[in-house]
């Protein structure tokens, strides 16, 4: 009754309509947390891709004369661990492992989740019933335990760990894509398109895909965060990356015994894992805030 | 004259609009006597709801009462501590709201919501509170009150929910009831029942009622005194009979012309334009931009509320020159 | 009488949920059984472990019926499962059921303590953030919960045991004490691991509660509660919270599964010999019956948790609308 809702930007005489892409970019890059998250993700990407060129040392080579060095000493930017391996180089290669884990597991999740979801959403009926029951059943497995079980039967190594994490994602991607497909399907224009004989692949590309993409993007960024968590947890337990290969998780478990004497090999991967997962989660939240209708945040 | 039950003196309420404090209600004064129903009338945005929220200090952080007094039996509510104010709310002054559908908590039974206010202000056992709740549910005309005590709000119709709200307000026998558009969301027959109920309760229990409405038809049915508000100011105050016989302010007259006529003669006229926003109040008469009778002098400086010999007060410099009766044959008798 | 209505509706809802469990459990048991087909190469070889003799491998093969056709293996698996026979662990040389039932109380204790810690942290901070929406307290809670969500529990567990357990020795760094040895001792051992395990759930609860309560506090019925003289404490914690708790209950249900998974890591760090530790050992050695038993059990626990969540919905939302 008293305050009118504010209408920003109405004072401009001519308002050029903003394309959806630009509006998304403006909203996503607005908050500093989102920009920071993007920066972390870019650094992670660069480290993962360019680890062999960026790493000053071989991550596996032990140097008995250079053990437990503090950061910035003797060409070791972040010091060395108890075996004299360069922490910075191991961190870079760990980024590579984490990146591969995230890519492969999300890839497995997408491959296993998206197609059944599109079928279920578009065809409904029998397909929907069967796939949805399977997804429900998969969801009732505690995520990390499901991954553990799969690693257990297939044997502990990085590839199996990634596959296992990917299977955890399948029902989650399935749910998101199915819901989005169903809601698009309810829209009348799809019915209209179908009635005039538009081919299914056209409907998929023109109508379903754009609507599925934004909720899926949100899920994918959150899945990246979970993949890093899961990979580092499994590697920490010795069920992922096998020693002496570096992973953020295994660096932590190797460094913990000597933590009081050489904290750096523990602190560095700790901060890295937290920051990277944080960046994935913040990006996911930022994406879900930036797509769809403009709404005020409380 | 007896001392008023509730006396609002020079109340000014400000709200934060685009980062600046803007007066939404300016210098409003009125009295409510025991057993009297006073109407606060105006279009939406006139500040009438804000005024009554300010009486109970219910406006959130975005609003503040910058000056004035709200005297309940001579005690200024605006100087009370938060805790003391909470003891007044629902106990000495109760309030009911416009939206019966959303004003009751969906997660609790209606009975427990009434019993809660009884126990809050009167103490006593659960059984006593329950008995009292059933009593007031019965009083406001809810059939099978004892059975319905344990039902949830979604099991009641809109009219019945407003009765529950009234029952809740009456449960502690407050001396003052504030009703903010209590019938707006209800259909016409239910509206009349609710208004009659409030009228009877005021008479039977000597309760003062402040009724906020935009509907002059409602005013004619149940009220004793009328305060017409426009753009945050009281523009006319009068007894209900006088105001219907001869409105003194062009805005009051305009509101009346927008009512359907009892005798069916003539059409409904709507006042052209919309009320100004708080940060755009005119310097002079705030109604002048929409007033058919406005002259240059109206817009020059602020207009005072002037008492009239016939009783009542009017905020219009031309009131003596104008005859604002609808038509001679149209005067309600 | 209407509480009777609510109870009846809850009962019928529960009936439908139990009915829906049948296909779910069928698929879960099929999936659990099918784990055997994921074993690369000869399953008997992997299960028997490295360096097992031909005779031992053959023994595993005939023991598990791996030489029989798949449908017959499945029938045997289901038959045994129905009788509560989960097979015998090859690592521990003990029936899986005995292993699990011995370790279950430990993991249930840990999970419960973690959940209680999560609620004790998550609810007050969520309420604080909602009441102070947009102010500094809100921002602190938001940043804190974002950080909490991003901290793997092995990282937090490691820091807690190293700093509080080993360095300052305020609480035991490792181990577990039965409740029969004293409640205080039991709790002392579970505080650090419970905190490490529960912090993610706490963050999620705080986030969800802040969002839903901030919305609820803007509702008309909250204004009604203030207008009838209820004190702020009652307005927020009674009228507000009961309406805002649904998403929190959902989170609690979902997080139960994550907590169970987290016990694998946390129990390893804190040297607690519960189900999580059992799972890790079983996984290390490819002990198929133990892995299958653990999966079946974990699913039973999460399914029970989600049933409890549904029951709570009926109480919180008398209208009985689904979310």
Image: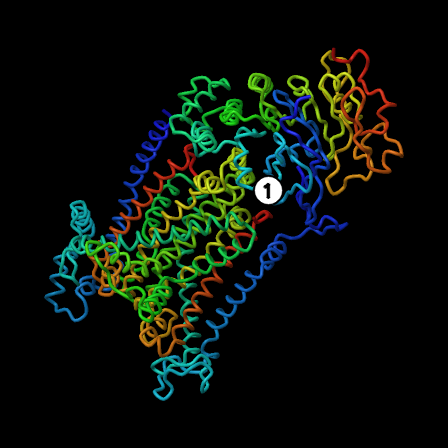
Q: Is residue B328 left or right of residue C106?
A: right
Q: Is residue B273 left or right of residue B202?
A: right
Residue B275 at x, y percent in the picture: 74, 34
User: In the structure shown, which secondary structural element does the residue marked by tag 1 occupy?
Assistant: loop
Residue A284 in view in this figure: no
Q: Is residue A136 left or right of residue A281?
A: left
Q: Measuring 44% from the left and 29% from the top, which residue is drawn there?
A: B115
The residue identified by callout 1 is B60
Q: Measuring 14% from the left and 60% from the top, which residue is drawn there?
A: C61
In the displayed structure, B120 sits above or below C37; it is above
* Residue in the foreground of this view, choosing between C232 and B184: C232
Quadrant for residue B110, please give it: top left
* Residue in the foreground of this view, choosing between A141 and A199: A141
Quadrant for residue B85, please give it: top right
In the displayed structure, A155 sits above or below B20; it is below
Residue A23 at x, y percent in the picture: 62, 54
- Disc 1 is attached to a residue of which chain? B
């Amino acid at each position: 009754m008293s305050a009118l809702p504010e209408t920003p930007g109405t004072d401009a005489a001519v308002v050029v309509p903003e394309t959806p892409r630009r509006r998304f970019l403006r909203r996503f890059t607005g908050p500093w947390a989102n920009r920071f998250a993007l920066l972390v993700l870019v650094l992670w990407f660069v480290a993962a891709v360019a680890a062999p060129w960026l790493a000053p040392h071989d991550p596996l080579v032990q140097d008995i004369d250079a053990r437990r060095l503090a950061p910035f000493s003797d060409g070791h930017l972040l010091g060395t661990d108890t075996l004299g391996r360069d922490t910075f180089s191991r961190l870079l290669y760990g980024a590579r492992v984490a990146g591969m884990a995230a890519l492969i597991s999300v890839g497995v999740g997408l491959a296993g989740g998206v197609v059944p979801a599109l079928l279920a959403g578009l065809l409904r009926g029998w397909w929907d019933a069967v796939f949805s029951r399977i997804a429900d059943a998969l969801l009732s497995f505690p995520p990390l335990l499901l991954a553990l079980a799969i690693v257990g039967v297939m044997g502990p190594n990085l590839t199996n760990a990634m596959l296992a994490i990917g299977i955890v994602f399948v029902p989650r991607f399935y749910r998101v894509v199915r819901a989005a497909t169903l809601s698009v399907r309810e829209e009348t224009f799809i019915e209209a398109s179908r009635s005039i004989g538009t081919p299914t692949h056209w409907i998929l590309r023109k109508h379903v895909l754009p609507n599925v993409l934004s909720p899926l993007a949100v899920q994918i960024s959150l899945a990246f965060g979970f993949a890093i968590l899961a990979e580092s947890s499994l590697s920490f337990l010795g069920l992922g990356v096998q020693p002496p290969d570096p992973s953020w998780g295994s660096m932590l478990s190797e460094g913990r015994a000597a933590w009081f004497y050489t904290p750096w090999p523990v602190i560095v991967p700790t901060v890295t894992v937290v920051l990277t997962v944080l960046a994935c989660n913040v990006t996911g939240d930022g994406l879900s805030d930036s797509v769809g209708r403009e709404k005020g945040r409380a | 004259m007896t001392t008023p039950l509730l006396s609002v003196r020079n109340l000014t309420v400000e709200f934060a609009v685009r980062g600046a404090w803007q007066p939404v209600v300016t210098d409003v004064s009125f009295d409510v006597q025991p057993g009297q129903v006073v109407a606060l009338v105006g279009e939406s945005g006139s500040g009438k709801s804000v005024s009554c929220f300010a009486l109970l200090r219910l406006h959130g952080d975005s609003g503040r009462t910058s000056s004035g007094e709200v005297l309940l039996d001579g005690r200024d509510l605006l100087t009370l501590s938060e805790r003391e104010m909470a003891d007044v709310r629902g106990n000495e002054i109760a309030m009911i709201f416009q939206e019966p559908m959303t004003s009751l908590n969906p997660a609790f039974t209606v009975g427990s919501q009434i019993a809660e206010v009884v126990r809050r202000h009167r103490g006593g056992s659960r059984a006593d509170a329950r008995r009292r709740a059933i009593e007031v549910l019965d009083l406001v005309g809810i059939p099978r009150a004892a059975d319905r005590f344990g039902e949830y709000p979604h099991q009641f119709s809109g009219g019945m929910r407003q009765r529950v709200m009234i029952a809740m307000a009456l449960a502690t026998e407050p001396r003052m009831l504030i009703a903010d558009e209590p019938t707006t969301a209800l259909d016409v027959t239910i509206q009349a029942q609710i208004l009659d109920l409030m009228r009877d309760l005021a008479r039977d229990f000597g309760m003062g009622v402040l009724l906020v409405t935009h509907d002059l038809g409602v005013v004619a049915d149940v009220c004793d005194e009328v305060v017409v508000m426009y753009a945050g100011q009281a523009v006319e105050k009068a007894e209900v009979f006088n105001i219907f016989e001869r409105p003194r302010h062009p805005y009051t007259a305009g509101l009346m012309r927008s009512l359907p006529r009892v005798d069916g003669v003539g059409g409904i006229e709507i006042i052209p334009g919309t009320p100004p926003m708080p940060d755009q109040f005119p310097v002079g008469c705030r109604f002048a931009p929409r007033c058919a009778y406005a002259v240059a002098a109206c817009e020059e400086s602020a207009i005072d509320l002037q008492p009239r010999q016939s009783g009542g007060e009017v905020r219009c410099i031309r009131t003596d020159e104008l005859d604002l009766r609808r038509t001679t044959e149209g005067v309600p008798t | 009488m209407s509480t009777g209505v609510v109870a009846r509706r809850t009962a019928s809802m529960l009936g439908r949920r139990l009915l829906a469990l049948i296909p779910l459990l069928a698929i879960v048991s099929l999936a659990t059984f099918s784990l055997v087909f994921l074993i690369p190469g000869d399953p008997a070889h992997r299960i028997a472990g490295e360096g097992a003799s031909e005779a031992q491998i053959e023994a595993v093969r005939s023991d598990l019926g791996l030489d029989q056709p798949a449908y017959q293996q499945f029938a045997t698996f289901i038959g045994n499962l129905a009788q509560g026979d989960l097979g015998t662990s090859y690592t521990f040389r003990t029936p899986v059921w005995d292993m699990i039932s011995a370790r279950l109380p430990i993991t249930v204790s840990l999970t419960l303590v973690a959940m209680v810690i999560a609620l004790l942290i998550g609810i007050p901070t969520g309420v604080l953030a909602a009441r102070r929406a947009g102010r500094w307290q809100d921002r602190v809670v938001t940043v804190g919960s974002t950080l909490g969500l991003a901290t793997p529990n092995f990282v937090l567990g490691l820091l807690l045991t190293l700093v509080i357990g080993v360095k300052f020795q305020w609480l035991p760094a490792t181990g577990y004490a039965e409740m029969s040895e004293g409640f205080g001792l039991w709790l002392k051992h579970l505080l650090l691991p419970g905190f490490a395990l529960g912090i993610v759930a706490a963050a999620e609860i705080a986030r969800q509660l802040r969002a839903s309560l901030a919305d609820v506090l803007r509702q008309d019925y909250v204004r009604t509660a203030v207008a009838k003289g209820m004190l702020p404490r009652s307005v927020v914690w009674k009228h507000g919270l009961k309406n805002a708790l649904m998403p929190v209950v959902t989170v609690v249900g979902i997080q139960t599964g994550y907590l169970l998974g987290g016990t694998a890591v946390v129990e390893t760090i804190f040297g607690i010999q519960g189900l999580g530790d059992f799972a890790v050992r079983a996984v290390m050695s490819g002990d198929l019956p133990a892995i299958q038993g653990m999966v079946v059990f974990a699913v039973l626990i999460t399914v029970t948790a989600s049933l409890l969540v549904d029951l709570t919905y009926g109480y919180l939302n008398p209208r009985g609308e689904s979310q």
